[in-house]
Amino acid sequence: MPELKLPKVVTEIRVCKEITAGVRTIFAVVRISTLESDDGNILGSWIMPRAMLIIEPGRQYAIDISGEQMSIETILEVAPSLKEIVEKARGIHRIRVD
């Protein structure tokens, strides 16, 4: 009897390209999932929005997909790649000391 191999679900969190709206910059955070066969073929995929990081002059905040306020720390846990963006928006510059 041949071995039955089930497809696997591969999920990753991605930050979409920034959107500028007036003085605001918005970064959408999405979860992308793909259904892959054992030989690497993609059988299906779906994208689910997770949250948004919004940067305004002097202010940064996050909103989850339900519209509720989300802490900056929480969105950075979900999408660590946003850390550099938040630090740049806050004007944080690290000085190397030898």
Image: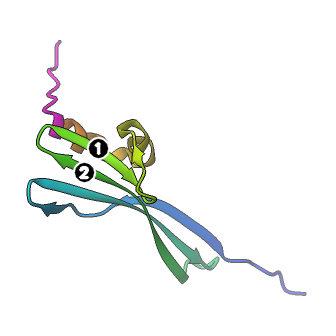
Horizontal and vertical percent position of residue 21: 13, 62
- In the depicted view, which residue is nearer to us: 4 or 59? 59
Where is 93 relative to 32, above or below? above
Left or right: 38, with 16 as reference point: right
**Residue 74 in view, yes or no:** yes
**Which amino acid, mark 2?**
Ile
- In the depicted view, which residue is nearer to us: 9 or 28? 28
Horizontal and vertical percent position of residue 30: 41, 63
Tell me where the magenta segment starts and ends, as one range.
89-98
Q: Residues within 10 Å of mark 1 (few under 14, many from 20)?
A: some
What secondary structure do most residues of the magenta stretch adopt? loop
Q: Does the segment drawn in magenta span residue 97?
A: yes
**Quadrant the N terminus occupies:** bottom right
If you read the primary sequence from the N terminus, does the residue marked by circle 2 or circle 1 appear first? 2
* Quarter-of-image position of residue 43: bottom right
Horizontal and vertical percent position of residue 96: 16, 19
Left or right: 89, with 3 as reference point: left
Q: Does the segment drawn in magenta span residue 38?
A: no
- Point out which mark residue 92 bears: none
* Residue plotted at (17% across, 55% down): 25
Can you identify the residue that label 2 sits on? Answer: 54
User: What element does badge 1 sit on?
Assistant: strand
Can you identify the residue that label 1 sits on? Answer: 61
**Which amino acid, mark 1?**
Tyr
Furthest-right residue in this view:
1
